[in-house]
Image (cartoon, rainbow, N blue to C red):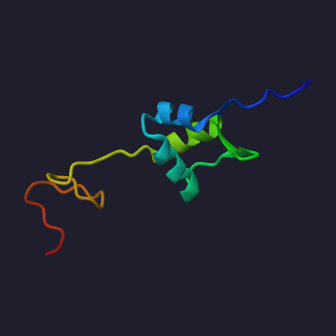
Amino acid sequence: MSAALPSLLTLDEAADVLRCSRKTVQRRIREGALPVVRIGRTCRVNEDDLRKFIRASTHCHRPTSGPYSPSGIVMKPGERLWD
């Protein structure tokens, strides 16, 4: 029984999935954030690695004003951090 081969995307296909430019994909590869498979002088992005990259790049943003602070501490109106 043979294992299924991973789906390999070109850099242009990866850029289409991410909705960014090919240069941005190349920059992420150079930074080491997105692994590639090198075949001679060409690069391919493993679909599973691209999914992991997307998951790792997903952030939950909180408002910078209001009851939420960047540290994640929720303050009630009128509440003081120190007395």
Check the image and name the residue furthest to the top: 1
Instruction: Say whether residue 72 is left or right of residue 19.
Output: left
Q: Position of residue 9 (x, y in %)?
A: 63, 33
Which residue, as the protein is rendered here, is positioned at the far bottom? 83
Q: Is residue 3 above or below residue 20?
A: above
Q: Residue at x 48, y 31 (%)?
A: 16
Residue 14, quarter of the rendered image: top right
Q: Quadrant of the C terminus?
A: bottom left
Q: Residue at x 35, y 45 (%)?
A: 60
Give the image location of residue 46, x and y in percent. Answer: 66, 37
Question: Residue at 58% across / 48% down in the picture?
Answer: 34
Report the residue that reaches farthest toward the front: 41
Q: Work out whether residue 35 can be spotted.
A: yes
Residue 80 or 71: which is nearer the viewer?
71
Q: Residue at x 66, y 46 (%)?
A: 36
Q: Position of residue 3 (x, y in %)?
A: 84, 28
Which residue occupies the foreground of this view, 13 or 65? 13
Of 23 and 32, the residue lying toward us:
23
Q: Quadrant of the N terminus?
A: top right
